[in-house]
Image (cartoon, rainbow, N blue to C red):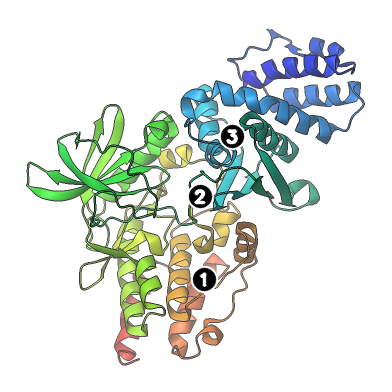
Amino acid sequence: MHGLIFFYMQKFADYLSRGGGGAVNVRATLVSDQGPYQPSGVYPDSEALRILEELAAEVSRPFPTVVAEFGEFLAPSLVRVATPWIDSTWRTLDLIENTESLIHAMVRAAKPGAEPPVLETVRVAPDELQLVYSSRRRLCTLATGLIRGMARHYGEKIDVEETSCMLRGDPFCSFTIRRKGGDTHASHSPLHDTVELSLPPEPESHADGGAQAADPLPERIGEYEILGLLGSGAMGRVYAARDPGLDRRVAVKVLSPSRARDPAARRRFIRESKAAAAIDHPHVVTIHRVGEHGGVPYIVMQLLEGCTLAAHGQAVGRVPVPEVLRIGREIAAGLAAAHGRGLVHRDLKPDNVFLEGPTRSVRIIDFGLARDLGEEATRITIDGALVGTPAYMSPERIGAQELDARSDLFSLGVILYELLAGRLPFQGASVVALLAAVARGVPESLAEAAPDVPAEICELVMALIAHDTARRPRDAASVAAALVDLARRHSGT
């Protein structure tokens, strides 16, 4: 555990002793065999837990209560320490939403092999956030205290509801956090955090529906002349630009400056560009160049005209069976090219499938979560993190099991099911309920959800979303071939 925590444990012991407890004696425990704990050091988790247990014993209060109190005491100080990484416009829910990246930036800078907790969030409304916490330490009471301490720092009132807990035998802890009263300035973060690579009618338009027109556009990024903002997401922004060398329009994706200060985020961003650039296929977005501008990395890619599969589905409702088969075949072909280079996309969803031009030809975009099955990429992956979009995540992703290309096939199956049935195979009222539904792996049969769809098409889709990876098709190339055959036999459907 980071030495900074031990520094604040001493201050917490002083705070408890001023409150009438006998915690002053615990100060002696805040010295290791090698001397006082240094704020810049890294120490075993067991030592921190021992100190908190002794604190609880001396003040005669339950251990979970003292851990929660320490979290609430600690949070404002950590916010001040992390000020260089925190956006000045953030408030409690915004900070919680970005806490995991901050933790990884700060903790991994001191100890690259550290295993900080997984904190996966979904912003369901400006004043409501759902949080999934997972850690082998199982210090969910500390997380609760930190949340309340953040709210105290910002002078906000919140409700924290714990809907599942590892201490009660659940696989992870989950919280619903609601802000009470006050303004609603916080920006909405949609469940599908992505950007749409098509030139908008006005430069200030955003594919994610946000409004950031007040931010001035850069005139240039590298040698590229910026024409307008295409969209923004968790990792940065995408601009429409002109390539002066070839006199063509391109898209330039720039990592946000706050993310660029995080070495892990920089490596992840660069890995995305290299992963996509390595694939030369008509159904995968083309990367032209990787560069750096003002210390911030960027990638230059083809500018796509059209819309995402998500937008197309919303516009037309249920998609005709022949078009579903064609879209599925092209996605599978693109995945086969990626898998052939050892890459698993890990975030395949309708927002990351672009339909280009009047023919709506598929282009798979956003390899931001792509995992190279080689050793190096595995080392820089956030340990056990639930990254991606819950509705399209495979069961092995949720369970942190061994991951291979069949995870993408599961996501493809969910997409096809949704296109054919007009709804998702796994549903839930919250992100936790949705994750639980996927983990159980008992969807309604597509034949029942869409009785007009031919039986053999239903069978293939249900095989793709099989809970057991061994029951799914062997690879994306075989899925593409099966979809070609199905399209031939059901061309008039």
User: Callout 1: 10 Å neighbours few (<14), some, many (20+)?
Assistant: many
Which residue is drawn at the image coordinates 48% and 34% (left, top)? 89
Percent from the top left, x then y, of residue 330? 30, 70
Left or right of 162? Residue 340 is left
- Does any portion of residue 214 appear in the rendered image? yes
Left or right of 158? Residue 476 is left
**Residue carrying label 3:** 115
Tell me the number on the disc at residue 387.
Answer: 2
Where residue 491 sits, quadrant-wise, is bottom left
Percent from the top left, x then y, of residue 2? 62, 22
Tell me the number on the disc at residue 465.
Answer: 1
Quarter holding the N terminus?
top right
Percent from the top left, x then y, of residue 437? 63, 66
- Does any portion of residue 473 appear in the rendered image? no
Tell me the number on the disc at residue 286.
Answer: none
Secondary structure under the numbered disc 3 in the rendered image: loop
Say whether disc 3 or disc 1 marks the residue closer to the N-terminus. 3
How far is mark 1 from mark 2, CA to CA? 19 Å
Seen from the viewer's position, the closer of residues 111 and 175 is 175
